[in-house]
Amino acid sequence: MRILKAFIIVLLCTTVTWAQNNIPQMSLSDKLAELDLDSCRIKDIGIVVSDIEYYIKTDSLTQKTDTTLIVNPTEILWQSEGYNINNLEETARMRVARRGRRKVLTSAPTFQYGVLQDMFQEFYYYVFSFEYQSVDADGNPVTLSAMAACPTLNASEVNNVVIGTHITMTSDKERPSSRFNNFGTEDWGMLFSLAAGPKMLFTEKYSLILGGASVSYIPGILASATLAFIAPGLAPLVLAGSVMVSIASFVYLCDQVDKANAYHAYNNNLVIMPDYEGYGASKDRAHPYLYQELTARQCVDAALYGMKLYKSDSKTQYIRLPFREEFRTMSCGFSQGGSVALAVHRFIEQNNLDQTLHFSGSYCGDGPYDPMSTLMYYVEQEKKGELMAMPIVLPLIVKGMLDSNPYMVSHKVEEYCNPKFLETGIMDWLASKEVPTYEVWDKFKTLYEKGMDGDTLYFRDIFVGRKNSDGKIEYSCKLSSIMNEECYAYFSKLYDDNKDTYTSADGIPLPKKRGVMEDLHLALASNDITKGWNPRHTAYLFHSKGDTTVPYVNALKAQNTMGFRAHVITAPNGLDHGDSGKDFFRGDSDIWDIVFERTLNLRLYDFVTDITDKSY
């Protein structure tokens, strides 16, 4: 296989104008035509549940009673940990799991919500984790892991399949199949909730308290479709990390569940989410960050194996439902997941798998579809004196290219990054898979304040303090502090020469020779997934103009190169990257509902033409 890689390098040296569109694609037809179920296995089956606590509070003066329902944070019960998920009565009443907490609540005589009357579970869906075979960057077999969420037996069939693709992460514990994951706060938590079906739970007017930091991240509650309707008319009162919804708003919310059921709602789906190579079963391997074609191939393999396991494995026989006759498949994700979702879309079409999968389109949020345009934006921000919005992105990209891209096989990170920036240990953090993305800011702060070996000034020329949206000081970097001088000079000149045209259909011209910087340029250009195809199915591209991490230029590039089925949806609130993700998954409008309704309820194999209505 090393000989094959060397041969590829020789070819690259003689054909310097290759981009991803011209690099030979892996031959996939044999592997995808007949799945080898002996090479995959279900590791565990569980049920995702959310407790409801029911309280009666009596007014001391009027003696009138008021009912309060508290929906607690979502958690998972694994079969391997002693839960019989096939016993619906057992899973519906989580007394064993909640006994300690319940005792504390009932023993508090002045508990603010009143007297605890009962505790029961009502919102749930099944999940199973599995391992499967795919290929790595060299074409060798590799074992990867994934998670699937599926409807409960309350449904009559599986409506559709959603290939979910998650955001950038830097620690293994953040992956979808982690046994310690938080189903209530991650992006895949919202996507998993698409496996749950809508249900009218209440017929009376109750106060409702929804546990968790944000209503938009409570999977499985009422219905995934419902979450998009929470915003209108709400003025929530925040109570100790919970959100209280007024009676009027709650009744409105329940009405929307009825409306969602009135047409082909996009609930009761099979949702399959790969961990990506480098996490889970393959955590000892490097993660090929933004190697789009490879990740797309691995995600499609996960979808095919996940569907096969659900349909035929003995472990799923008690939770299995038939597929709707005209089920559809779509891909969906945000940030890195947005670009992967689009790459999955392209891969499926280019390998003629759209009929096999009943594929009908993708919904992609704020994705780096064109790494070169993204880098040009960063250079532009540098020239304006701005800091990097997310400094870890550039070392992630460089590491991903070095680990997996054929153009970069002979290079080292020191050829591209500032030596002092590398002394922070950032590459070791990424390699360890133990430091979550959100903890990187704390490490930057420590380095700024304490330096190394007590030298508090050592990193002061690397990091700059600034206030974030919460008013807290965080420490970021300039692009020129991350890149070494040669690297910054190369891409700065590239920007100066193409600053007026880099988002056009032609994009940045490819280098005419090979070299250290030219190879990074070629590697980035090879992962431009806006080029070389015109989608047969609609790709909805949600993007915020206020995004400074994955800039709006990515949506412009897609719109300029992919044809009329690349339908750009400009985020209504213009928020920065993290908050734009919340808009994408729930937001303050019904975009989510409209896109899913259109994508999953098209007539099979009908292609959407130009959409002119502006209902969102």
Image (spheres, rainbow, N blue to C red):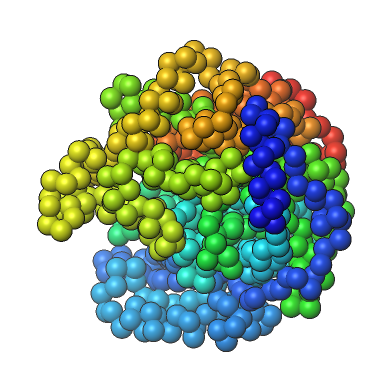
506 or 80: which is nearer to us? 506
- Quadrant of the image for the N terminus? bottom right
Q: Residue 595, can we see it? A: no
Identify the residue at image location x=12%, y=52%. 455
Q: Position of residue 327 (x, y in %)?
A: 81, 51
Location of residue 192 with respect to 315 vertically, above or below: above
Q: Residue 431 falls in which quadrant of the image?
A: bottom left
Q: Residue 432, can we see it? A: yes
Q: Position of residue 274 (x, y in %)?
A: 62, 58
- Quadrant of the image for the C terminus? top right
Q: Position of residue 352 (x, y in %)?
A: 84, 42
Q: Is residue 365 left or right of residue 127?
A: left
Q: Is residue 322 left or right of residue 479?
A: right
379 or 534: which is nearer to us? 379
Location of residue 254 with respect to 559 vertically, above or below: below
Q: Is residue 64 left or right of residue 526?
A: left
